Amino acid sequence: MNRLADATSPYLLQHADNPVQWWLWTPEAFEEARRRDVPVLLSVGYAACHWCHVMAHESFEDAEIAAAMNEHFVNIKVDREERPDVDSVYMEATQAMTGQGGWPMTCFLTPDGEPFHCGTYYPPKPLRGMPSFPQLLEAVASAWSERGAEVRAAATRVVEQLASQPSALPEAGVDDAALDAAVSRLGSEFDAVHGGFGDAPKFPPSMVLEFLLRHHERTGSAEALRLATSTAGAMARGGLYDQLAGGFARYSVDAAWVVPHFEKMLYDNALLLRAYAHLARLDVDASGLARRVARETAEFLLRDLRTSDGAFAASLDADTEGVEGLTYVWTPEELVAVLGEQDGRWAAELLVVTPEGTFEQGASTLRLPADPDDVERWRRVRDVLAEARSRRPQPGIDDKVVTSWNGMALTALVEAAAALDEPQWVQDARRAAELLVQRHVVDGRLRRSSRDGVVGQAAGVLEDHGCLAEGLLALHQATGEQSWLDAACALLDTALQQFADPEHPGSFFDTAADAEALVRRPSDPTDNASPSGASATAAALLTAAALAGPDRATRYRAAAEQALSRAGLLVQRAPRFAGHWLAAAEALSHGPVQIAVAGDEAAERADLLAVARRNAPGGAVAVAGPPDAAAVPLLAGRGLVDGATAAYVCRGYVCDRPVTSAEDLVAALAR
């Protein structure tokens, strides 16, 4: 019996018709393994994953392979996005055993959940020295039946070895010298030819960009700005970026940003929207590329990833009808067929669509190495191509609502609204936030995800608390509404109570103290594709400390500083994987800057607040409201000046002389 039909995860539902007798990750599944005295086969993936689809079609839909799985194992299917805790624990084991990781992840466990053999994708037939999946199934089943005690002992040793690894980084602070050194280290890893850092495959370094922009604002570093603008420009002009409809793919398989892995993830686009909006706000880009890309990325989120109830879906698939990139790639002949001979040839040259192609079977991804001289022609051509592409088969959408990723989207939309003067985006963020607060908080505790109005059973992890709190704090600043600050503080109080490591102050676990016990309690401080739970929480604590009343402010700031004291070693050794930590450290070094706008007239307050949000450095906080508004801590004691709306620029609640004009506010922020 396949038990996935009632799952809330689209990834699990993709497997609901497999002949494999899949179980959900439940205590009952492990109890069944004990009853039958067989191992657990754990398969972990996600809906937009190309190789997950490949293994599903090759093996999980094959009746003979499924029969072997059903006979010898209890088979559990997990959506890594729905259960990042499970994914983290067994990915750590996979990397320890094989030296690498990825999805689909295939792990064999004892009925107590202890891993004894782990890997990723396995082909249905032997391939380049890799055993076939049926061969692996047979070997594991034989080992279990013939040497079961030995296998269990080996699994116990694996768990003991993982448990022996330190759960917390040593204390090493992130001071101004460490921030300068991080820029130098990033410069040494910078790809001067193609932009970005490292070699292929190349991932968009969204959080590193945010750090570099904040560092430039604080120090005036031309090097930090160069690294950021070069990388942002290269990504936006390459195949990683959707030149027709906006939005970024997951990563580039090559070093030059030409061919992407085509899935579009909410978290990537939210983080990149924030970075490009920040770059646009700095107004150092004469071409207007950052402003255009920020606008198009926001429009992509709102058009293609927004769910019917106003939140944001997890991803668009890499595949269309089982073919990777089918929706997105073009040949010169296809361009001519859609646009006509003249426009088609012009577009092929402009978008680097060649007869040889840059992808498979002579097709090419679309790139825009330079803006065309005839902008109106390009707009017309792009609209025609986008409309023609919309008639092609489209990739599937994973429409579950993930709490942390939606939190990132709230922050990005609110900050982009300020940078690009789009107040409607704040209202779009408000609608999503209302859903998250009302639906994802159950009996006072946060859940990980929902779908079609039904909240999932998986508990929220640390990144959910940190990222959603940061988004709610952004919304509080944009609207002045106290309810968002209160909701954010409630999440942060839970994070400090349930996730903090009592034995290592400043460290956090990724799961709550009262969460389901796994073979190891995960704790990963590294910023990878998205912020680590610890860095997201530290950043939110720092922002909340600048907005909350004195009692909470003192406690939150101390917790944020303590968390940053644990990030120093990571920052020193691998700044590419500490971007969010570095951005938070920049905000701390800058104050963070606080701007309170107090006035009786809503329109006047809004005008000065808009000036503040466009000109304040990254990580600053800004709130507007009535004078002496005791309910909003940053406004308490901030009054009018000679009867006029006034802006107070502060650091740590110590304020400069208030100003009443936009010009004086810009000058105060520049100081």
Image (spheres, rainbow, N blue to C red):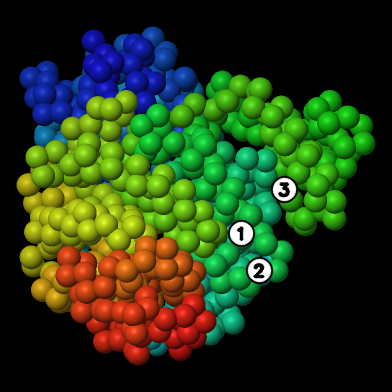
**How many numbered dots are placed on residues in this image?**
3
Q: Nearer the viewer, residue 434 or 423?
A: 423
Quarter occupied by the N terminus: top left
Image point 56% across, 71% down: which residue?
Answer: 282
Residue sticking out furthest to the front: 643
Label 1 vs 2, first from the N-terminus: 2
- Residue located beneath label 1 in the image: 291
Image point 55% across, 59% down: which residue?
Answer: 420
Mark number, residue 285:
2
Q: Look at label 1 and name its amino acid.
A: Arg
Image point 32% across, 73% down: which residue?
Answer: 598
Q: Residues within 10 Å of mark 3 (few under 14, many from 20)?
A: many
Left or right side of 239 for 460: left
Left or right side of 556 for 221: right
Q: Look at label 2 and name its amino acid.
A: Asp
Q: Residues within 10 Å of mark 1 (few under 14, many from 20)?
A: many
Q: Secondary structure at mark 2?
A: loop
**Residue 429, placed above or below residue 643:** above
Disc 3 + disc 2, Cβ < 8 Å: no
Where does the image place residue 595, in percent across and percent down from the top left? 35, 76
Residue 235 occupies quadrant: bottom right
Label 3 vs 1, first from the N-terminus: 1
Image point 42% across, 63% down: which residue?
Answer: 603
Where does the image place residue 54, in percent across and percent down from the top left? 49, 26
Q: Secondary structure at mark 1?
A: helix
- Residue located beneath label 3 in the image: 367
Q: Look at label 3 and name its amino acid.
A: Arg
